[in-house]
Amino acid sequence: MADSSNLYIGTSGWSYPKGEGTWNGYFYPKGKVNELEYYSQFFKTVELNSSFYRPPNPGYAYNWVRRTPADFLFAVKLWQKFTHPKMYKEATGKEAVIYQEDVDLFLGSIEPLIKSGKLGAILAQFPPSFKNDDFGKEILEAVIMIFGQYRLAVELRHRSWSDDEDIARLLRDNNVAWVQIDEPKFKSSIAQELPTTSDMAYFRFHGRNAEMWWKGDSETRYKYLYSPEEMTELTEKVRLASEQTGLLFAFFNNHWQGYAPRNAIDMMKSLQLPLKSP
């Protein structure tokens, strides 16, 4: 087992205030509470998802640093302009042409995390439609070139990537972590077992709600609580990966009504990690 101090278990995002899937009253107590401060009493890492939609205000990032313990780490999802050009165009009406000012804008937005040593990793999540063709490889190589100076993890979801042995070599040569994902499996899905390509391991657990995966919304798609048997399976994968790497992140994205923190704590208990209490 790797040093437990290098195992970071948490959730994808910490703020789910609205809708049926809210965490209020399930994870967060009723009444006014600073959610990040409360969250950081249980976990020592979180995956920042809001940065996917737009680079955060550096002032917000400074406050995140200030409100979390010294050993707390943030994994930051890369801005969609770099990974989801179609979604970016639909959201903004503009083509996702990347300029140096876009790189500077994104890195500047998370500068407080970088300077404080609280940037755990940058996550580049690509859509299921992102395939291993000439254009796809060009985009992937560009992201690695631009952000490879930081701890970088890439989430590739189409099977064409895992069918090509050269992709593992590309990631390994650049010490980029290949994100291990758990989600409903389809014919086009990437392989369930991916090689270790970095001294960092990175897991994302999205739930297995196959029925709602394509027709559900951003809440119901993730309405899934992992069973004890499934948690045993996932925990064993994390345990094995921790023995091969020096740093490991595992984030639960099954966020409906606080399912994610429940399963994250389940995993921490199974791994015999020290549990915090508020």
Image (cartoon, grey):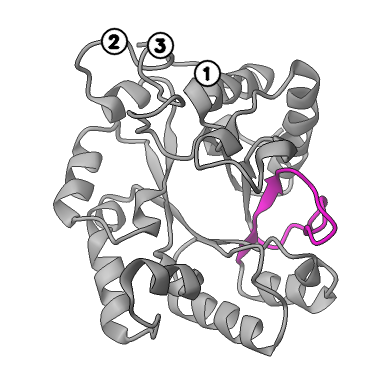
Crowd band around label 1 with a 10 angstrom C-alpha radius: few (<14), some (14–19), many (20+): few
**Residue 10 point in image, percent of width and height:** 50, 33
Query: Which residue position is annotated with label 3?
Result: 277
Q: Residue at x 55, y 38 (%)?
A: 253
In which quarter of the view is residue 147 placed? bottom left
Sequence-wise first label, 2 or 1: 2
Nearer the viewer's eye, disc 2 or disc 1?
Answer: 2
Residue nearest the viewer, comparing 145 with 86? 86
Sequence-wise, the earlier of marks 3 and 2 is 2
In the image, which disc is placed on residue 126?
Answer: none
In magenta, the rendered stretch is 176-198
Provide the secondary structure element on which disc 3 rests: loop
Q: Which residue is mark 1?
A: 274
From the viewer's perspective, tell me whether residue 143 is left or right of residue 95. Answer: right
Q: Give the residue type that dot 3 points to.
A: Ser
Name the kind of residue labelled 1 in the image: Pro
264 w.r.t. 171: above or below: above
Marks 3 and 2 sit apart, C-alpha to C-alpha, by 17 Å
Whether label 1 touches label 3, CB < 8 Å: no
**Residue at point 43%, 66% (across, down):** 80
Residue 13 picture quarter:
top left
Q: CA distance from mark 2 to mark 1?
A: 26 Å
Is the stretch drawn in magenta largely helix, strand or loop? loop
Residue 148 seen? no
Could you say which disc has been placed on residue 30 in the image? 2
Residue 61: percent from left, percent from top: 23, 49
Number of other residues with Cα within 10 Å of mark 3, as a class: few under 14, some 14 to 19, many 20 or more = few
Whether the magenta-drawn stretch holds residue 175 is answered as no
Q: Compared with residue 120, is residue 70 higher up or lower down, i.e. above or below?
A: above
